[in-house]
Amino acid sequence: MVQEATNGGSEKSQLAITVEQLIAVNPYNPDILPDLENYVNEQVLSQTYNLDANLCLLRLYQFEPDRMSTPIVARILVKALMAMPAPDYSLCLFLIPDRVQIEEQFKTLNVLSHFLETARFRQFWDEAAKSRHIVEAVSGFEQAIRAYAVHVLSITYQKVPRTILAEAINIEGVSLDKFLEHQVSNNGWVVEKGQGKGQVITLPPTEFNHPELKKNTADSVPLEHITRIFPILG
């Protein structure tokens, strides 16, 4: 069954329901191509996301290469980037022929993906600025990448300098101040005393940035299992 991820808990659109039904009946029917393509455009405008439907479309393109729309494929990849840290981008890329991937826009998207995977956020934002015609065509792109950058920082650092945060999310000045105020109020961040670039932000403790919080159940053996072993050893 196709599952749709939506923002704000909004109900599925009629097109989303139709696509779900079409895929359930026959996901390899080339006649559903137009509906799947329209659904990609709807996801772009409504800031919703359906990986299953997008993968279905990419698989159909493999059987109908003459009907492939490279703008649609590019939008699918941008939406997949926005889903990081999920591996959606790689799943989609696997279904795209090499002859398509050598096109300039797809080379750019692959570079952007590499920068995100390696947490090279400064390089990512610089490259994205050169390719606004690709990424800005999808609503919510910058917000999604900022959320991913915050995720990476949160599982990596206990404390992060303001300058590092600003570089990762590509926000500075008053806009960064407002962003920090929101995080302090809603997500437990603490801004330590300091002015301007000298500020340090303390991030909430997690099992990733505070290893001592991790509950490693794999390394613990229940007492009853140990008592069963003793008679065997004897």
Image (cartoon, grey):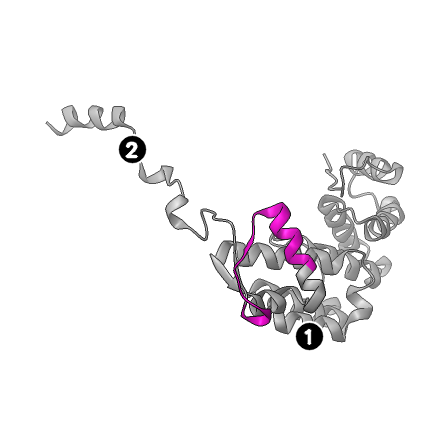
In depth, the one of 8 and 194 nearer the eye is: 194
**Badge 2: residue crowd in 10 Å (few <14, some 14–19, many ≥20):** few
> In the rendered picture of this protein, how many numbered marks are placed on residues?
2
Q: Residue furthest left?
A: 234
Circle 1 SS class? helix
Q: Give the x, y percent position of residue 56.
A: 75, 47
- The reply, left or right, for residue 103 in relation to residue 117 is right
**Badge 1: residue crowd in 10 Å (few <14, some 14–19, many ≥20):** few
Q: Which residue is mark 2?
A: 221
Residue 223 to residue 69: above or below? above
Q: Which mark is residue 188?
A: none
Is residue 183 located in the magenta-colored stretch of the structure?
A: yes
Amino acid type, mark 1: Asp
Amino acid type, mark 2: Val
Write the start and end of the magenta stretch as one range.
178-198
- Circles 2 and 1 in contact, beta carbons < 8 Å: no
> Which of the image's four quarters has the N terminus?
top right
In depth, the one of 128 and 208 nearer the eye is: 208
Q: Quadrant of the rendered structure where residue 191 is?
A: bottom right
Q: Give the x, y percent position of residue 14.
A: 88, 36
Circle 2 SS class? loop
Question: At x 73% / y 42%, what residue is drawn?
Answer: 5
Q: Give the x, y percent position of residue 214.
A: 41, 44
> Which of the image's four quarters has the C terminus?
top left
Disc 2 or disc 1, which is closer to the eye? 1
In depth, the one of 133 and 147 nearer the eye is: 147
Q: Quadrant of the rendered structure where residue 78 is?
A: bottom right
- The reply, left or right, for residue 72 in relation to residue 221 is right
Question: At x 56% / y 47%, what residue is drawn?
Answer: 188
Q: Provide the major secondary structure of the magenta segment.
A: helix
Q: Which residue is mark 1?
A: 126
Res 98 seen here: no
